[in-house]
Image: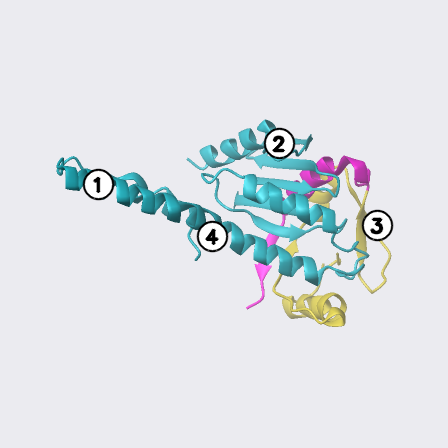
Amino acid sequence: MFHIDGLEDGEIWEIGEHYVTSPFGKTLYGRGDILIAEIEKTGLTLEYNNVPPRHANISGWPAPEDKDKQMSLAQELAAKATLKLRS
Amino acid sequence: MVASVETLNTPFARTRTDSGQSADAERLHVILSQLLDSLLPSITLGGRFRVLAELKLAYEEASEDNWDGYGAQKAQAESLKYAEDFLIALPTTIPLPEAAIDPDGEISFTWQLAPRLVFSVSVSSDGVLSYAGLFGRNKTHGTEDFVQVIPKAISDNLERLFSTRG
């Protein structure tokens, strides 16, 4: 995921295309925007690595053998995110 | 042929009028019933075949490691087999789910009615079903073994999801 504070909408789509979809020959259809505070409320944390610039990972996920717990947290994040479709 | 589950819930399948009581009418009814019985399985499976076809396509697209650019594992062949059995075992009264490949290579199914009305099942390569649901402010999650029949915990949660829709 990418930190998008202070970016124009067009710049955000550009990041998605440049770093996420184009390198894999995929098409960018949409994105989910979420506040950092909402991620932290679930007990997960954000770790910036800036590779590529503005990139971060969500960490603190339950162990792989607790996939149901991972899924539950992912549903919570998805419900709090705002879906934006590419026009 | 693609038919939605909604189509199957219309009264067309078993409608019988009482207006014709003659032997011919009775015979006609038997023939009609046999015809419907022979057609219904293909109609019922029609939508499932569409989801299975979509699933196969997704499986092929995720057939190599790192298919998402984030280090995802390739889709698991055994998971696909269990997922196909799971899909076919679903009651026909349950609308068909969206199918996807997860980053760990498992196949998952999701029914989403609203952002906080969602239920997902992930199928592992050894037939374990991990599930999670969001029903408004209520949450549930757990695991079940899949042995040809949809586990009660999962069918109960699907029933809960679709009854919440009102």
Chain letter matching colour cyan: B
- Eyeballing the image, is B136 above or below A1? above
Give the Cα distance between marks 1 and 2.
53 Å
Q: Chain of mark 4?
A: B
Residue at the spot 60% in from the left edge and 30% down from the top edge: B151
**Would you call the spot at circle 3 few (<14 residues within 10 Å), some (14-19), or many (20 or more)?**
few
Q: Earlier in the sequence, mark 1 or mark 2?
A: 1
Amino acid type, residue under disc 3 in the picture:
Glu
Report whether B137 appears left or right of A40. left
Dot 1: element: helix
Q: Quadrant of the N terminus of chain A?
A: bottom right
Distance CA(mark 2)–CA(mark 3): 26 Å
Chain for numbered disc 3: A
Alpha carbon of mark 4 to alpha carbon of mark 3: how far? 46 Å
- Residues A1 and B152: in front is B152
Q: List the residue tagged with mark 4.
A: B46
Residue A67: in magenta span: yes
Q: CA distance from mark 3 to mark 1?
A: 73 Å
The answer to the question of whether label 3 and label 1 lie on touching residues, with beta carbons closer than 8 A, is no
Is A10 or B134 nearer to us in this picture? B134
Magenta run includes residue B46: no
Asked if both marks, 3 and 1, belong to the same chain, the answer given is no
- The reply, left or right, for residue B21 in relation to residue A66 is left
Image position of A33 with respect to B122: above or below: below
**Chain ID, mark 1:** B
Residue span colored magenta: A60-87
| Disc assigned to residue B27 | 1
Tag 2 residue: B139
Chain A, which colour? yellow
